[in-house]
Image (cartoon, rainbow, N blue to C red):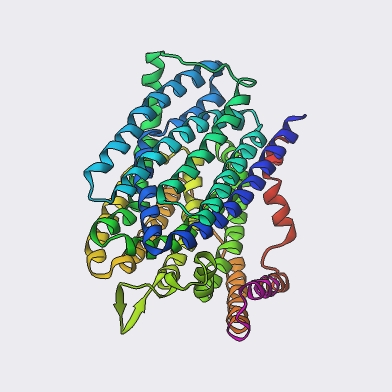
Amino acid sequence: MSYTRKVAFNTIAQFAGKIIGIGIALVTIGILFRFLGVEGAGKYTTVFAFTSFFALFADIGLGWTMLRELSVEKDQNKVFQNIFTMRLILGIFIYAVAALVIWLFAYTPDVKMSVGILSIAWFFQSLTSNAVQIYLNKYRMDIAVLAEVVGKACILLVVYLISIHGGSLMSVMGAYLAGCFVNFVIVWSLAGKFVKTGLAFDFVYWRYALRQALPIGITLVFGYVYYKVDSLMLSWIQGMTDVGIYGAPYKLLEVLQMFPALFLGSAFSLVTRYVANKDERLNSAFQKQFDFLSLIAVPIVIGTFILALPIITFITGSGGEFTTSSTVTLFGREMTSITCLKILIFSVGVNFFSTLYNFMIVSLGKQKQMILPTICFALINIILNLILIPRYSYIGASVSTLFTEALVLIATYYVSRRNIILPLRFNVFGKVLLSGIVMGLSCWGVYYYSGGLILTLLVAIVVYAIMVTVLKALPINTLKNIFKANQSETS
């Protein structure tokens, strides 16, 4: 297979796998939230938020460092074995600490035991990610993607069985352990075909790798703080019911935020090449990325805002627990998960464009310039949550998330512009916004007269497609160029 075909195949495999994985994740979340209820969903969200924090220390940027080193170092066996050994030792230590430290907090025993189970699951996942870097380097992401999909399907199957036959929060975490282990077995059973596996203790290389990894690791740790600390602070200040009310829309937010990285990742190599060669086509490529992200973000934000009630009902079930549960009253109205979703969906839209500038900063090789801003984001977010959560609970956390995302967009734009000027045209964005507004009005009319979410979504897609086509918001050639990005790099 030619290099061009390898790149194209690798890109298609990643894109298809992520879409399937997102679909499986949404179904799994829907079953879980129906099964667990509001308080159980709060515990589930807390377990993941707590374990996620320690997962960052088990990596500290070594994953990104391995990927880069595999591309520039001739002795790939040396790179893989040494960084794998470092991550193995770190993983054992960090996840053991996570399983022990949780007992210092005033959580219920099932939450504490669940953190221990999930820590084991994510230990296997961290080992899996080492092998995935090899598949990415060798343009065989089809193997890694297949393993990931099978692992997620395993989680879905076990969660479904638990929901039917009954089970606890710990059994749900057992489902994730089973899925992560299956993923681990498939990935590692074939890794030996591409690299010599084993342990290595080249301490000189370890020091070098750590120096490369730590700036990324610091950014990841503080990025986590402003991204997920709100769930933990809710659990400490308010309780599991409030976390559950916040957790339902927040899980949807996490899934939706995968889309910009999924799209931008497919063209990352080409954009980086343009930057390195000072290619005049960089401006055009950046504009096309902005236009395409607008095309996706606008209908997601407008549609979700208008259809927040049926979306939450669809995800969490028709029992009404999530749509009616409330511990906050503002302006004489009960604030529920629906209110959270209406606020958080705007942070998703902002995130689409901050991700665009983040990718550009990495392409420029200026990610170190984001360390101080990221630390500031974390501190600001914590302060905002300390002010807002005691009084407004999950509504305060939602506002804090939106405000912080806006700051991230401003900062990434500033850092990017300080290093390179990429002027944007907003004519396509204006057309997309008009198309989104018309689509939103059609959503409102169809749903509130028919009451059917699926019918409403189908009508919305058709209306939006017609409007975008009539207004020529995104020429067909632009789409072709975007998805041929990686192939173009090899020409």
Q: Is residue 31 above or below residue 98?
A: below
Residue 345: image x %, image y %? 47, 66
Q: Is residue 296 above or below residue 325?
A: above
Residue drawn 25% across and 42% down? Answer: 103
State the extent of the magenta-drawn residues as a range. Answer: 448-463
Taking the magenta stretch, the answer to whether it contains residue 457 is yes
Q: Which is more toward the observer, 386 or 403? A: 386
Residue occupying the far right of the picture: 1
Residue drawn 34% across and 60% down? Answer: 243
Please identify the quadrant where the N terminus is shown: top right
Residue 161: image x %, image y %? 55, 51
**Secondary structure mainly formed by the magenta segment:** helix
Q: Is residue 135 visible?
A: yes
Residue 452: image x %, image y %? 62, 77
Taking the magenta stretch, the answer to whether it contains residue 182 is no
480 vs 113, left or right, is right
Residue drawn 72% across and 62% down? Answer: 475
Residue drawn 46% across and 42% down? Answer: 174
Q: Which is more toward the observer, 116 or 56? A: 116
Q: Is residue 400 visible?
A: no
